[in-house]
Image (cartoon, helix red, strand yellow):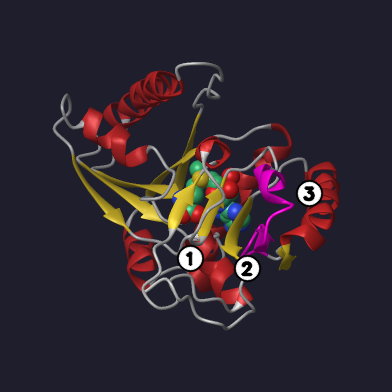
Amino acid sequence: MVKKLYLIGIGPGDIKYLTLEAKSVIERLSLFYVSKKEGRKEDLTLRKIALLKAIKGDNFKIVALPFPERTKGKDYREKIRAWRTEKAKILREALVNADEEEAGFLIWGDPSLFDGHIDIMRELERELPIAWEVIPGLSSFQILCAKERISLTEISTPVIFHTPRTLLKSKPPEHPAVVFLDNYETFQKFKDKEFYIYWGAYVGSEDELYVSGRLREVWEKIHNVRKDLKHKKGYLMEVYVLKPLKPPGEVSDSN
Ligand SMILES: C[S@@+](CC[C@H](N)C(=O)[O-])C[C@H]1O[C@@H](n2cnc3c(N)ncnc32)[C@H](O)[C@@H]1O
């Protein structure tokens, strides 16, 4: 049985973005878990395998866990909790049945951002004698900011992290907003307002693509690029920053 699990943030999956700590933990371990993706999304599992191969050759075992897709609908939080409990059961089974005493779970970006595995481990540790540790990774939004050469916080400006659900309910953000998981082009809600948008797809990978500019001028381009990419690749990994309009480089006067 696995007695210690490492939740390893792997950034966008390219070895050059892996932290030295993540790399050395991967070097040491021989068993890794990933969530199983099928169909055109299988690419996501294959990219994790490629990262492991780049570090370990063929010297590792990988278990792709068949987590269910999340069901959508009302009672969002309740549904997420139930989904995580389902995932916890599947992970528990895999941990209990493993021969290894230590293992790693590979997580895109950083495990603290829009990822349920920390909560799942909190649930599991109540019933299993298991230790666990989080290894930080470079989040997609950090790579986006670097590529676009933007300072998110300028001079002490607060920043908010959104999913489309929360952005949809919010007023036009007064401070920079970082948006993940937006399958609904929620930025269109603000297309007549004064914002810059910095939008990135598959950031930090060989397919990375960026579009930035005044929201009212580039939203349609983003819409078209999104459609194209989804069609070509079958899935889209995207993250964006919405900034209340100020010329690039001009600092916030919020303080
Ligand atoms: C479940 S969240 C995990 C976020 C991750 N923990 C992070 O720190 O980036 C997955 C979402 O993050 C965003 N994302 C993750 N990796 C990305 C990448 N390489 N390029 C663009 N967006 C990415 C996408 O919005 C994707 O749908």
Is residue 162 in the magenta section? no
> Which of the 4 image quarters holds residue 250?
bottom right
Q: Which residues are magenta?
A: 186-205
- Disc 2, SS: loop
Query: Do the CB atoms of the residues marked 1 and 3 lie less than 8 Å apart?
Result: no
**Which numbered tag is attached to residue 27?**
none
83 or 46, nearer to the observer: 83
Query: Can you identify the residue that label 2 sits on?
Result: 245
Count neighbours of disc 2 (C-alpha within 10 A) and say few if under 14, some if 14 to 19, many if 20 or more: some
- Tell me the kind of residue under disc 1: Ile
Count of labels shown? 3
The tag earlier along the polypeptide, 3 or 2, is: 3
- Distance from label 3 to label 2 (Cα)? 23 Å
Q: Is mark 2 within 8 Å of ligand 1?
A: no
Q: Amino acid at mark 2?
A: Leu
- Please tell me whether mark 3 or mark 2 is closer to you in this view: 2
Structural distance between the alpha carbons of marks 1 and 2: 43 Å
Residue 23: x and y in percent read: 39, 67
Labels 3 & 2 near each other (Cβ < 8 A): no
Residue picked out by circle 3: 226
Can you say which quadrant of the picture contains the C terminus?
Answer: bottom left
Q: On the image, which quarter does residue 247 sit in?
A: bottom right
What is the quadrant of the N terminus in the image?
Answer: top left
Closer to us: mark 1 or mark 2? 2
In the rendered structure, find residue 55 and report the number of the disc placed on it. 1
**Secondary structure at numbered mark 3:** helix
